[in-house]
Image (cartoon, rainbow, N blue to C red):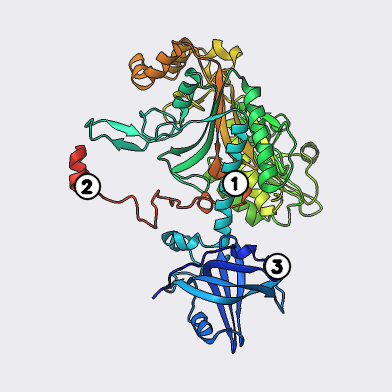
Amino acid sequence: MAESMGNLRRTHGCGEVTDPGMEVVVGGFVQKVRKLGNLMFITLRDRSGVVQLAFGDDTDREMFDKAASCHSEYVLLVKGTAVQRESINPDMPTGRIEIKPSELRILAKAETTPFVVSDEVSANEDLRLKYRYLDLRRAPLQHNLMMRHKIAKCAREYFYANDFIEIETPMMMKSTPEGARDYLIPSRVHPGSFYALPQSPQIYKQLLMVAGMERYIQLARCFRDEDLRADRQPEFTQIDLEMSFVDVEDILEITEGFVKKLVQDVLGREITTPLPRLSYAEAMRRYGSDKPDTRFGMEIQDVSELVKDSGFGVFSGAVQAGGSVRCIVAKQAAKILSRKEIDKLTEMVRGIGAKGLAFIRWAEEKPSCSFAKFFSEDAMTALTDAIDCRQGDVALFVADRNAVTLPTLGALRLEVARKLNIIPEDKLNFLWITQFPFFEKDEETGAWVAMHHPFTMPEEECLPYLESDPGKVTAKAYDLVLNGIELCSGSMRITDFELQEKMFRALGLTDEEIEAKFGFLVEAYRYGAPPHGGLGIGLDRLTMVLCQAESLRDVVAFPKVKDASELMSQCPSPVEQENLDVLGITVKP
């Protein structure tokens, strides 16, 4: 039988017992039991750390036997005195002391766990997610969740201090097109009608500005029914804010203040503000990405003018068709990027849409080049000089439409950097990306769609092109990037109801569709709306980057896996037919 706590109450966390002479009561899980004849040691663990319990000849025999019956993950409550350890463990914060127990209670016994609960674990992730409550006992995951808590706490403190009001917006809302599929909730009271879980509080926070709240903040839960990956979950949290009577600079400035405080409070480090900025066009030109990792160089170079008249049809043909020839140069990479490795990279770029990969690999005295027979010695020298390719380097070329060339080289740049191990892990490179295109073409339909969302304000000078040349329209939109990961996205909002209706029409919406989906928002603008804008910072992604975690699953308490299921509770799951009948729903086999 397990024992009760009785009148014994915990006074310290295990990791807080640091000095000899401390009289303490600690509680936690048994991490390890070591029996050495008439000596026995138990490592006790709670979220604050671990501490060693020592039992010996001077221990009450009944207590010694009780301790000897303990196994991993038993829950203990122990009263005792901290004493100096004979053999100090420098790897433990509490490694100078151990506790001599005077009272021991076994509060809960534990069966053998499906995997060993330890910092380093060999069990596969699916098994750990099935028993997530055990996985969460491990110090690395507890550290991540506590880091997430600190970030959320810092956000609230900062925005409260800057006169923001925290307001909750509905979790059941009208389904509106915002880029991903909605999670839908059937209504029992309104048969055939559905609520949607919010992809973001976008419309509500804009209406709060119309309502005169001026500065809004919320740690908002958001839901998107889309394919998962390492930095995406179907439900996530964003630090959501909106401000009235501001322009882009005001929003960037308030966000930078939060980022500066966050890094200082949570990591104890300093960053310099204002943060660097790149336009979308420049980011794509230099890095092939709208969320570039700037911790290393290897920028994209345009060699179209140099090679457009070469006899190499792949190069000249791409330029003549209105595309370009671009490359990256990996310095001192020839030993690592062998021909076999370059072949692997070629397959990789073909898998993401490129036709192939040309290269110069300068391992010996003379470079080896996949297109050498089309270039004279002087032309090859001119090319290598122009791109600063020297002995020991590898240059990789892609020729195609810019829509293929740039993102392909952007992905290739990251892959090569990983292979060369040149990405410094201790850097925090924040970067604003600004002046996004307002529209992008849907590859399947050819229709123009909003790159951010249809409430984004275009740059004033672009308004004449809304209908005549949508590709020229740029938006008052901005993303914050950290180490190649998008942390937040935001924009100034359209507040003129006539312009908003015009924007909807530019996106191909009919008057009936506008009224059905956004009529209440357009009507609200008819009663006067102050200029406003905002953004949403991904709390999960921010935590993932600051913890240097590999996946969002490592910073979320109970995450979903790739097929959006949760292995521990086995959801989603079927429901009783009577529940479906009430909702008027029939499930097709």
Please tell me whether residue 44 is drawn above or below residue 64 in the rendered image: above
CA separation in Å, label 1 and label 3: 27 Å
In the picture of the structure, the residue carrying the numbered disc 3 is 19
- Foreground mark, 1 or 3? 3
| Label 1: element kind | helix
In the picture of the structure, the residue carrying the numbered disc 2 is 589
Task: Left or right? Give the position of 101 relative to 520.
Answer: right
Q: Residue at x 61, y 12 (%)?
A: 461
The x, y position of residue 271, in whole percent, is: 73, 39
Mark 3 residue type: Asp
- Total tally of numbered discs in the picture: 3
Task: Left or right? Give the position of 432 relative to 457.
Answer: right
The x, y position of residue 54, in whole percent, is: 61, 79
Marking on residue 150: 1
Q: Residue at x 40, y 50 (%)?
A: 563
- The answer to whether marks 1 and 3 mark residues whose Cβ atoms lie closer than 8 Å is no
- The N terminus, quarter of image: bottom left
Please tell me how crowded label 2 is: few (under 14), some (14-19), or many (20+) other residues with Cα within 10 Å: few
Q: Nearer the viewer, residue 27 or 70?
A: 27
Marking on residue 506: none
Q: Within the image, what quadrant is residue 192 found in?
A: top left
Mark 1 residue type: Lys
